[in-house]
Amino acid sequence: MGKLDTSFRHVRTKDAPILSDIYRPYVEETAISFETEPPSATEFTARIEKIASRYPWIVCECQGQVVGYAYASKHRDRAAYRWCVDVAVYLDQNFHGRGLGRRLYERLISELRELGYVNAFAGIAMPNEKSIGLHKSLGFEEVGTYRTAGYKLGRWHDVSWWQLKLRECVTAPAEPRVKSHERTAE
């Protein structure tokens, strides 16, 4: 397999249709996502506007075509959690196994550190050895399992939770910053 001509950038609302297409098989064919109805491009636009206004959302392009994305989002609603984020990565199924998920996550993690976040959490619907391998390779550590957390595709699935410490915890930490890169609309 030759080297892919790839580039990375922040998401734009005009990416919504392709992101929806990339995500659709995860919803329809797997338990990787616990959603049961694929979100439309309109719903994806709303998600981009909400999430990317505060947190990094990065897309990977291969020869000008978006083939994957990774993003961070709010971990929990309570104020004391504000230094923590949830993270996720999704790739077009034709681009698995080429290191793009790792490269997307590395860029996302770097931005999260720069913004002042302390912890990143990832939930992995089980079984999913590929995702576990990716998260382990990036330094995530398993912190627990929600047993029989979701019912999809005719069976119950556990969700394994993983944590990556982004920076040292300090007394009186500075507030995490809102991302300040280009606007998401285009």
Image: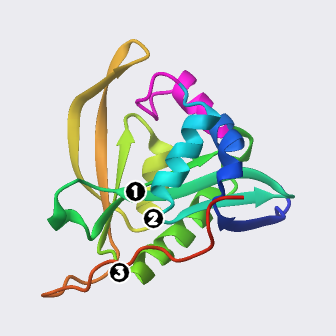
According to the picture, the residue beneath numbered tag 2 turns out to be 55
Residue 137 in percent (x, y) is at 47, 64
SS assignment at label 2: loop
Residue 24 covered by magenta stretch: yes
Mark toward the start of the polypeptide (1 vs 2):
2
The image quarter in which residue 127 lies: top left
What residue occupies the far left of the structure in this picture? 171
The image quadrant where one finds the N terminus is bottom right
Mark found first going from the N terminus, 2 or 3: 2
Q: Which residue is mark 1?
A: 73
How far apart in space, not on screen, are marks 3 and 1 (Cα)? 14 Å
Q: 130 left or right of 25?
A: left
Q: Position of residue 161 (x, y in %)?
A: 29, 49
146 with respect to 7 (left or right): left
- Residue 117's tag is none
**Residue contact between numbered discs 1 and 2, judged by CB atoms under 8 Å:** yes
Which residues fall within the magenta stretch?
22-37
Residue 116 disc label: 3
